[in-house]
Amino acid sequence: MRRDFYSKALILFAVVVFIIACTPRSSYKSLSVFFDGVPNPDVIDSIARADSLSKIAMTKDAPARDRVRTEYVFHPPYVDKECASCHDQGQMGKLLEPMPGLCYQCHEDFADQFEVLHGPVGGGFCTECHNPHLTKDKHLLVRTGQDLCLGCHNTNDVFSNEVHEDIEDADCTECHNPHGGDDRFIFN
C-alpha cells in the first residue's frame, strides 16, 4: 500500500516536472531548483537582442538612441540556441562527446598543427581557458591577460625566471602560443 502511494507520487511528480519544463523559461525555473549554472533564458534573450542590434546599429550615422552595445561575446551555437549541437537534451545537458572531440567537430584540431601541445589543450580541457557560452572576451576566455595563465602557472615560478624579469603586465601570449608550439616553451 505504502509502496504503491510512493510510486504514484513519483509518477505524478515526473509528469508535473515534464509539463513545467515545456518552455525554456519554465525549464529554467524547474532545473535551477536542482542545478547551479542553468542559463537564464531571459538574460540570454536580452543580451542576444542587444548583440544583434549592436551589429546593425553601431555605425556613426545611427541615432544615439539606436546605438546599443553589449559587453558579451557569444559562442555561435549558444546564441543561436543550438544547445543540442553540444548537449544531449535527453541526458540533462550532458555533452554529446567528451572534449576536445566535441570542440574539434567545429574547431581545428591543434594536434595537427603543433609538435607540442599546451597541457590543457593536450588533455582536452578546453573549458579551463574558454567559456563555451559567453564571456566579455572576444576569444571566449574565462580570464584575460596574465590572470589567464597565472590561474594554473605558479606566479613565483614565472616571475623568478630571469627571462620574465621585465615583462610587467605584458600578455603571456605575446611570446607564448596558448595552444601549442614546436618546443616545450610553446613560443610563437
Image: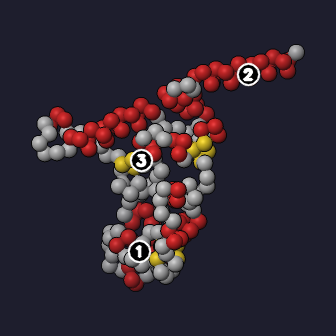
Observer-side mark, 3 or 2, equals 3
Dividing the image into 4 quarters, which one contains the C terminus?
Answer: bottom left
Q: Which mark is residue 176?
A: 1
- Whole-percent x and y of residue 24? 50, 29
Q: Which residue is mark 3?
A: 76
The number of numbered discs placed on residues in the rendered structure image is 3
Q: Are marks 1 and 2 in contact (CB under 8 Å)?
A: no
Label 3 element class: helix
Q: Quadrant of residue 41?
A: top left
Q: CA distance from mark 3 to mark 2?
A: 37 Å
Q: Please tell me which residue lies in front, 146 or 79.
A: 79
Other residues around mark 3 within 10 Å, as few (<14) / some (14–19) / many (≥20)? few
Sequence-first tag of 3 and 2: 2
Sequence-first tag of 1 and 2: 2
Observer-side mark, 1 or 3, equals 3
Q: Are marks 3 and 2 in contact (CB under 8 Å)?
A: no
